[in-house]
Image (tube, helix red, strand yellow):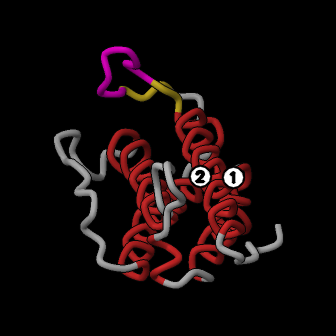
């Protein structure tokens, strides 16, 4: 059994609903923040892409070196952000398709003094849960603007 067999719903359900929600919004709606709120839907999407880039692409799979840094605000529009996020996610999905589930519990070195290692299972779950959390915030921002989020 491959890791993808356990996490296929990320590719088939979770990510498509996230992208569908973002694509329902105009640039103005993506940029909108209610008074006192910390992030727009676009900023949350960039933050979700950053999370997958940091935890999986950089830290776990080491596609980018630890010294590499994410440049916030580099995406001029949703299409460019989603294109880059999809490139990152393709690497994640390919790893899942190539890896037996027995490898999910292997300890991976992490570059943090307070977290010197993590299992790939923890990393994947963490990134997925993070996306679900922020997708809920995007759905809330949509409803506050009178936009119906996708049905789950």
Which residue is under mark 2? 134
Q: x%, y% of residue 151?
A: 82, 72
Lower position in the chain sequence, tag 1 or tag 2: 1
Residue farthest toward the top in the current orientation of the protein: 114
Residue 131: x %, y % from top left: 59, 52
The local secondary structure at tag 2 comes to helix
Q: Residue 92 or 40: which is nearer the viewer?
A: 40
**Which circle marks residue 7 in the picture?**
1
The picture places residue 87, in percent across and down from the top left corner, at 40, 70
Q: How many marks?
A: 2
Q: Residue at x 21, y 45 (%)?
A: 65
Query: 37 above or below 140?
Result: above
**Rendered residue at 42%/82% (across/down):** 79
**Which SS does the magenta portion mostly show?**
strand
Q: Residues within 10 Å of mark 1 (few under 14, many from 20)?
A: some
Figure check: 137 above or below 101: below
Task: Give the magenta-colored segment's residue range.
Answer: 110-117
Name the side, left or right, on which 28 lies relative to 14: left
Q: Residue at x 31, y 16 (%)?
A: 113
Quadrant containing the C terminus is bottom right
- Is residue 107 toward the left or the right of residue 128 in the image? left
> What's the CA distance linking mark 1 and mark 2?
19 Å
Tell which of 54 and 40 is nearer to you.
40
Q: Residues within 10 Å of mark 2 (few under 14, many from 20)?
A: some
Dot 1: element: helix
Please name which of the two marks, 1 or 2, marks the residue nearer to the observer.
2
Residue sitting at the far right: 151
């Amino acid at each position: 059994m491959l890791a993808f067999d356990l996490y296929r719903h990320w590719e088939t359900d979770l990510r498509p609903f996230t992208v569908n929600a973002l694509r329902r919004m105009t640039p103005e709606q993506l940029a909108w923040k209610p008074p006192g709120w910390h992030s727009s839907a676009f900023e949350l999407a960039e933050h979700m892409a950053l999370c997958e880039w940091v935890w999986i692409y950089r830290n776990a799979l080491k596609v980018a070196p630890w010294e590499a840094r994410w440049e916030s605000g580099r995406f001029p529009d949703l299409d460019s952000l989603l294109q880059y996020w999809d490139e990152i996610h393709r690497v994640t999905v390919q790893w899942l398709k190539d890896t037996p589930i027995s490898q999910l519990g292997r300890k991976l070195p992490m570059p943090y003094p307070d977290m010197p290692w993590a299992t790939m299972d923890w990393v994947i779950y963490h990134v997925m849960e993070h996306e679900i959390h922020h997708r809920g915030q995007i759905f809330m921002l949509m409803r506050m603007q009178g936009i119906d989020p996708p049905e789950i």
